[in-house]
Image (cartoon, rainbow, N blue to C red):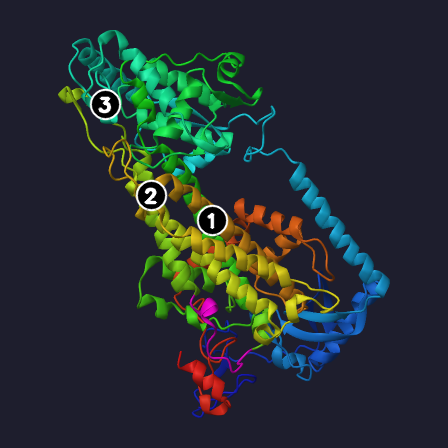
Amino acid sequence: MTIDSRKKVQPEEDDGEDVTIKHCPPIFASFEIQQSLPTVVCDKMRLQVQIGTECLVVPCKPEDTVHSVARKSVEKLRRLRPKLPLADNYFEVRRTIGNSLLDPEDLVSDVLKDSDFIIVAANVEETEDAKEAKKQEEIDNARAELDRIDNRRRKVSFADALAPMVLAPPTKLIILDGNSLLPEDLVRCEKGECAIQLSMEAEVKIKKARTFLEKIASEHRPVYGITTGFGTFSNVTIPPEKIKKLQLNLIRSHATGYGEPLAPNRARMLLALRINILAKGHSGISVENIKKMIAAFNAFCVSYVPQQGTVGCSGDLCPLAHLALGLLGEGKMWSPNTGWGPADAVLKKNNLEPLVLGPKEGLALINGTQMVTALGAFTLERAHNIARQADVIAALSLDVLKGTTRAYDPDIHRIRPHRGQNLSALRLRALLHSEANPSQIAESHRNCSKVQDAYTLRCVPQVHGVVHDTIEFVREIITTEMNSATDNPLVFADREEIISGGNFHGEYPAKALDYLAIAVAELAQMSERRLERLVNKELSGLPTFLTPDGGLNSGFMTVQLCAASLVSENKVLCHPSSVDSIPTSCNQEDHVSMGGFSARKALTVVEHVEAVLAMELLAACQGIEFLKPLMSTAPLHKVYTLVRSVAPPLNEDRYMKPEIDAVVEMIRENKIWETVLPHLETLEAMEELDPDALRQFAKTPTGIVQDRSLIPITDSEEEDGDD
């Protein structure tokens, strides 16, 4: 039989029934047999029209053209909103569902249904005065936001805080048991969000170990660090009357660090982590002293801890000795109501008692890997945040550069099933153009001749993916280390033994953090190259250095230069410190990890990566200014709007560092990720239900045209295709 989808038809064999086509969603094609119904012809239609941020209902007739409806809509809005600077003409018309471009010459009844939604992109007609006023308003709003950020009370950065300050009270309580502390818990401690408390089970284990240790000490048995000296002096027996003096001397003699101190909030992480290790009940410390340490933590009283001076074996002796020294009432400490001051005065001001050391307690305080592990946990969480946001920023750059999303097809990544690679590809599919998540920018180069992009666009899942996997590998090592007994000797009260071992060796966290630095640095390598493409007219099609008046203005010229310098520094910082070892303590400690530097330089690498990605994000948002009125996908447009809250478009050269710093702060606070997360969760769930929901098929925007014979190919393209 013959079927015309616009008319009621008769079957070839007369069976007394009419066949009509049922209107179905565009994905499905179906029809059903129905009883004869009278044909209804609508002589009027109503369309829902969006122009900019305004929506209005426009009546029309089926025989009207799309062009006449668009003109009528613009005229109606100009009448209703006379202050809007709308021109008489318009740019284009699209159907909202599917973001399909409409031909102005088509009849409304052929391409639309009654009550359909359409978007009319109208031209803006602004006077020079209006443009200048708008530009000034954007700059004023951005400055106001920067002032708001700069003036708010911060709980995080105390690096230069020598004076007293007011801190918000903690909102969370962490129970320390020596087994369940997580990296994110340490970050909460660093932010001042948490108070801590010892678990009841941990208190029982600590008491049991301490009772056994005091028994050993009273019997004057030869046990390392209890009745003997340390290191090379382990063969020297200490008289009973000097056992307590031995522990105090240990702390004083080992507090020989160099360089700038840890910021108080980072020293607080170090204190929390050391308390957690002692809570395992294998160190031999007394309950009284560990409760004094907890009281100091909760009062935010922390010691002056120089950042340099540890070789990461036997543990972080030097920084942990400085940490203990303040708790003994010697050296310097910091608290919110005193700033830096003599430790005894700071403790007294906060109604705290200094530690009083018994047998082995000095050794219990300083023998372990807590410096490298605490900084490592902090760096790990920062790396986790920036790696996720790197996927988002790469997606925005790809859309602005009019790249193809076909490289993220799920089947490509299914046959190379690295977890991180597939996760990154899924995020890119969810953020970029699809029928469920349209991008006008992607639609603007529908069926272009581009087959593939440069590696920094095409290979994002493969490069970012291994970063995600490395972060999870490092997370496992750091989390294990955070809940491990790492001092020496170790007390096993249940079997009544004290055993010397090597758990203090920092090779595990040192190696892991060297891996982390190497992996995360790749995010900046990729980002800087995408930034170069954005500012290079030959690669992006956008104005050189993303400025509308090049020559008079330099635009983003030195933004890319700064990014390149940070990437170059990272290359040096990524040399692994853990490949080095210098024997210490008269060759008793003949192999060391150098983990302290592994941790410090890994954090510096992450800070550089945050800055480079912030610069790329600013450049991508600037690129969008030259593609307007086209818009990216909904989640990426939200990212653009977020950035514009602190950094207006760069219409002419201005001082940009405050804006770069503001975007870096957004990234550190995880704002970019939080902005797109609800959308990601929705679309990832959609793909789980329908594997083709986010897939880009051939002959769709940014897809490959199937018949290559229809497209002229240049010699250079043939060479590129070999890659």
For the residue pair 367 and 300, the one nearer the viewer reads as 367
Residue 161: x percent and y percent?
A: 58, 30
Magenta-tinted stretch: 446-459
Q: What amino acid is at disc 2?
A: Ala
Q: Residue at point 42% right, 38% down?
A: 375
Q: Secondary structure at mark 2?
A: helix
For the residue pair 604 and 426, the one nearer the viewer reads as 604
Q: Secondary structure at mark 1?
A: helix
Residue 410 seen in render: yes
For the residue pair 26 and 46, the one nearer the viewer reads as 26
Q: Is residue 550 above or below residue 313?
A: below
Where, quadrant-wise, is the C terminus in this rendering?
bottom left
Sequence order check: which comes first, mark 3 or mark 2? 3
In the image, 158: left or right of 458?
right
Residue 449 among those drawn in magenta: yes
Distance Cα–Cα, label 3 vs label 2: 27 Å
Q: Which residue is mark 1?
A: 606
Residue 233 numbered tag: 3
Q: Secondary structure at mark 3?
A: helix
Is most of the magenta stretch helix, strand or loop?
loop
- Of badges 1 and 3, nearer the viewer stands 3
